[in-house]
Amino acid sequence: MAERPSAAQEALSKVEDQLSCLVCLKPYTNPRLLSCFHVYCQHCLEDIVAHNRQGQLECPKCRRPTPLPPTGVSGLQAAFNIHHLFDIQETLKKVKEPQKLACEKCSKTTRKATSFCRQCTKFICDLCTNIHKEYEEFEGHEVVTIEKVEGDLIRLVSPKKTSSRCPKHDDIMRLYCETCGEVICINCTVQIHKDHKYCVIADTFESHKKEILDSLGPVEKQLEATDTALVNLEGRHAEIIEHGGKIATNVHSKFDELHQALYALEGELMAELEGHTQQQLKSLSAQREEVEILQTQRSSCLHFVREIIRTGSPGDVLKMKQGVVKQVRELVDTFDPNTLEPRETTNTCFVPSAQLVKDCKEFGAIGIPSVTVTPTKRLDKTRVQGSTSLRFSNTNHPLIQIPSLNIKAELISKSTNQTTNCVVKERGKGEYEISYQPTVGGASELIVRVGGEEVAGSPFPVAVKTPIDKLGTVIKTINDLKKPHGVALNQAREIIVPEQGAGIVSIFSPTGDKLRTLDTRGTAVGKMKNPCGVAVDGDDNILVVDGGNYRLLKFSRGGDMIAAVGSHGDGPGQFNYPNCVCVNSVNGKVYTYVVDNGAHCVHIFNSDLTFSSKFGSKGSGNGQFNRPWDVASDRSGCVYVADAGNTRVQVFTPDGGYLRQFGKKGGGNGELYYPACICVDCDDLVYVAEYGNKRVSVFTYEGVFLKSFVSPGSGPGQFNSPYGIAVDQCGVVYVCDNGNNRVQIFS
């Protein structure tokens, strides 16, 4: 049996493998570093450039191009870490035969070395070892035995970190210019880098080292992703082969039934299958090569940068900093996660014909069936934590059962981007079922893929409604508003918010991004002075109450003014202080209701904004108001008025006839304190935002209390003067938090 090599011999072998140029396969001579962090001999790189028609330098290993400096290959960064490996190699050669090692520190060269000093990088005898322990000048030196050296030599050999000299002034470069990102000497500060910001390398190195190492974070994640992708590609490779084998077995069994009559066609189909499978494997192999290149680039980046940080002097590291960080960022920015997903699937199938004997030419085909999706439940009735299912069926090959493994589905919330995984089950006869349980309310999208491709109609819109008992979680906040007063939603779920403090109406996307502004500040007709209420009609037009100009304005969705009505006064269509607005549709007729806070009444306008009538007067009786604040309507056309001063909600017929009321002053469940805004959802649940209690209370349309949420304050989910509330079809609640200059969105 061959003798097992020593640790030193194994380490020497590993080091020598790293000292060979991949081009000439010889030890490095004048090694130069490429932007991909791979190292080659200078003369090898010069040969590559000379044989390239465009004179470009492309890495032989990962094929990434490296820009050439004006001086050519010789101007590339020297790979100083390779020199450290050569030092390790020399030391390892000595350790291979420890019995022949003599002391390299004292004058008695005949003394046998028994230890190794990492800082001195010398083998020393027992006497020198004792001197290291006793003399102050050797304090901090790490001295280890020969046995320890043999077991951990590469770590113990300290890199020779030498300070670079300035090529212009032949002085040691001890400074780093923050302005230029260059290592400089003291003379450079007088000439080229005059008035620049610079500091001593030793003082700033740690912060810059941290910046370099921090830049590697995304690369580490990308390397992990490539590792996972390669495993997935290997698995998909096996799946395709296995799946192809299953299809082949199916083909054979069918052809056996027809014996010699279909023998010739059997061979043709097998050839087609083989070609299809090989084409997929070829494509998969090409993708694997792409991912391996990505892996090589990022692995080399991580290894090299960490190595130069460990082995290079601060000056050398900082000299390379800009280039390294630039290349690292380029690696990160050019990374495409889509490259990692297997492009090929196991969707190949054998499709037998119904007329096997009659027409051999139509016996079968190799292909991928298409599918359609038929919902088995109304997607606008999906509930949080409720199970919903969809049914799938094949359209062109209903007899083919696609493995559920190849059907993927996910439910994605449009407001939070939260993903809910779905379960796919085979039902037989070409039918499948997807089930899911969403955990967050709001508008969502169901994405269905078969073999990596989305099916027709995907993504499917899904309205996920939060149960009332779970309502109250902040899912998004729109900040930096100026006294928002009112909120409404259009058909595209855009969020429309009047900003009293700015005299404008701002419009946001469903995710809270600012889209556009109705900015018509002023007192002229069509201008706004104090927008304090907003609604959207059935044509997506925007109605804005301008309390400062005593007007009701109507804009198109794009912001063009359509109409303006109202003036200051007590006559028909005149306002004392209009506050909020809602649009109500009853039996095909459209009415607009405007609350007049100063006149203690509600105005009713026709669809063309001509005055129709008004109802209410100051008082506390049925149908009377004390500072009414907001108005809303339900599916049947009933009108709900937030009677703030009387701490109640009153309900009226569409023409203003009194029906009922609910609420009384207090802070308990079902009690109200200055209800300032109100809205009704598609299930006729009534949401009341209370200015006095700084909360939202939810009632049935009959006034039965269900729930309240939020408390006073400025933190997430707290209110300071709620003025304006809206709810969408998913039960997502939008509240203007006027005192905190924001809109909070709850689910």
Image (tube, helix red, strand yellow):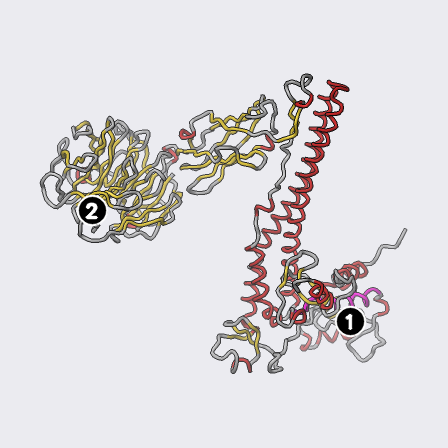
Q: Is 85 colored magenta in this rendering?
A: yes
State the residue in front, 359 or 269: 359
Which element type, helix, strand or loop, lies under badge 1? strand
Give the image location of residue 590, x and y in percent: 23, 32
State the residue in front, 695 or 115: 695
Amino acid, disc 2: Asp
Give the image location of residue 547, x and y in percent: 18, 47
The answer to whether 422 is drawn above or below residue 21 in the figure is: above
Disc number at residue 123? Answer: 1
Quadrant containing the C terminus is top left
Task: For marks 2 and 1, give the one nearer the viewer.
Answer: 2
> Whole-Å distance between the Cαs marked 2 and 1?
89 Å
- Left or right of residue 187: residue 109: right
Q: Is 237 colored magenta in this rendering?
A: no
Dominant secondary-structure state across the stretch colored magenta: helix
Question: Could you tell me if residue 615 is visible in this image?
Answer: no
Q: Residue at x 59, y 35 (%)?
A: 451
- Left or right of residue 474: residue 586: left
- Farthest residue in the right direction? 1
- Farthest residue in the top direction? 358
Disc number at residue 404? Answer: none
Report the magenta residues as a range: 77-96
Residue named by callout 2? 546
Give the image location of residue 125, x and y in percent: 80, 73
Question: Could you tell me if residue 385 is visible in this image?
Answer: yes
State the residue in front, 202 or 186: 186
| Mark sitting earlier along the chain (2/1) | 1
Amino acid, disc 1: Phe
Which element type, helix, strand or loop, lies under badge 2? strand
The answer to whether 550 is drawn above or below residue 375 in the figure is: below
- Left or right of residue 192: residue 307: right
